[in-house]
């Protein structure tokens, strides 16, 4: 522990599992207070108990504006401020533009893009009140699929690409407004988290790792901490000159 995030309060959506869980653990280890926001109440409370006094759980449906207002208010009530927002909640869907239904399209966008918009909208409004001494940071988890398209990922490509440009728009708005808030997006490829469970169920863990790993130049899936430490960096003042940037963590896919 080096206290890279000492004094900072972070709210992390999708914080009960996957990249959000990893981010919460590492940020707390580096001195931050973390609010774990998720619809998975049992997992979220268990993680908060595991981390200890530096963590608090709040139930959050990212598609609900009222939920967002309440979650942010509870974060400030619990820890006295808000400096960092990590929008990590998301779902995947593998379907072509012909196969996907309008209902499926809207659900993916509601969680993966609308949820990020609501977080940015209300997060900026609160974070700007608390950044006189500590810089604020919004970190939006997009995907390599927000940069590179796939024939069978119509909705996911669209939503994650939207997160990429929304992050830049938020960055420019905060800079133009004179807020001490940065906004950046993170673009992982296959990371061994629950978002891959549908592949895990279909193929089994070993075969899934082999099949997906073959698509990555490095030859394997990513590990959650390989993204988690990037989240710590973006939350810290070490990245104070980074805004509107995209951090690509894809094992070399985008280099091909």
Image: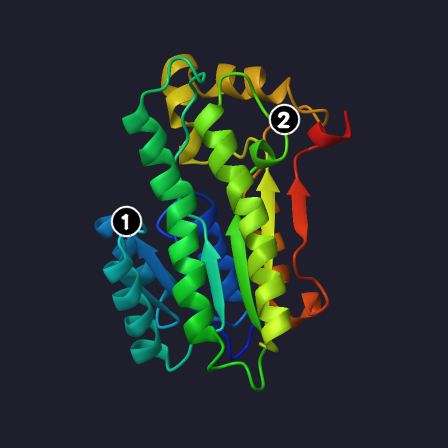
- Of residues 79 and 173, the one nearer the viewer is 173
- Of residues 26 and 247, the one nearer the viewer is 247
Q: Residues within 10 Å of mark 2 (few under 14, many from 20)?
A: some
Mark 2 falls on what kind of element?
loop
Q: Looking at this rendering, what residue extends furthest in the right direction?
A: 255
Q: Residue at horizontal 60%, vertical 62%?
A: 171
Colour scheme: rainbow
Q: Which residue is mark 1?
A: 43
Q: Is residue 137 above or below residue 133?
A: above
Mark 1 falls on what kind of element?
helix
Q: Do labels 1 and 2 touch, CB within 8 Å?
A: no
Q: Residue at horizontal 56%, vertical 21%?
A: 150
Q: Residues within 10 Å of mark 1 (few under 14, many from 20)?
A: some
Q: Residue at horizontal 37%, vertical 34%?
A: 108
Q: Quadrant of the N terminus?
A: bottom right
Q: Is residue 166 above or below residue 155?
A: below
Q: Which residue is mark 2?
A: 220
- The quarter holding residue 37 reads bottom left
- Of residues 19 and 30, the one nearer the viewer is 19
1 or 2: tag closer to the N-terminus = 1
- Of residues 152 and 251, the one nearer the viewer is 152
Q: Give the number of callouts.
A: 2
Residue 225 visible at all: no
Q: Quadrant of the C terminus?
A: top right
Q: Residue 151, position in %: x, y?
A: 54, 16
Q: Residue 30, position in %: x, y?
A: 55, 68
Query: In the rendered view, does 169 fall on the left or right side of 37?
Result: right
Q: Residue 40, position in %: x, y?
A: 26, 47
Q: Residue at horizontal 24%, vertical 61%?
A: 66
Q: Residue 234, position in %: x, y?
A: 62, 61
**Mark 1 to mark 2: distance in Å?**
28 Å
Q: Looking at this rendering, what residue extends furthest in the bottom direction?
A: 132
């Amino acid at each position: 522990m080096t206290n890279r995030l000492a004094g900072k309060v972070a709210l992390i959506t999708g914080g009960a599992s996957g990249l959000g869980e990893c981010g919460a653990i590492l940020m707390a280890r580096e001195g931050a207070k973390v609010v774990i926001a998720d619809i998975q109440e049992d997992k979220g409370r268990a993680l908060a108990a595991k981390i200890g006094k530096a963590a608090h759980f709040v139930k959050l449906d990212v598609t609900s504006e009222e939920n967002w207002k309440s979650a942010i208010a509870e974060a400030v009530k619990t820890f006295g401020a808000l400096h960092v927002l990590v929008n990590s909640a998301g779902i995947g869907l593998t379907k072509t533009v012909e196969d996907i239904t309008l209902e499926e399209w809207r659900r993916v966008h509601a969680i993966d893009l609308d949820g990020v918009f609501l977080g940015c909208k209300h997060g900026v409004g609160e974070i700007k009140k608390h950044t006189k001494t500590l810089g604020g940071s919004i970190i939006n988890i997009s995907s390599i699929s927000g940069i590179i398209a796939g024939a069978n990922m119509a909705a996911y490509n669209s939503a994650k690409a939207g997160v990429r440009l929304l992050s830049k728009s938020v960055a420019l708005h905060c800079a133009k407004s004179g807020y001490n808030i940065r906004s950046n997006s993170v673009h992982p490829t296959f990371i061994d988290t629950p978002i891959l469970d549908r592949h895990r169920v279909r193929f089994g863990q070993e075969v899934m790792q082999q099949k997906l790993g073959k698509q990555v130049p490095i030859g394997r899936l990513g590990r959650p901490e390989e993204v988690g430490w990037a989240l710590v960096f973006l939350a810290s003042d070490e990245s104070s000159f980074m805004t509107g940037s995209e951090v690509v963590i894809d094992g070399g896919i985008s280099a091909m």
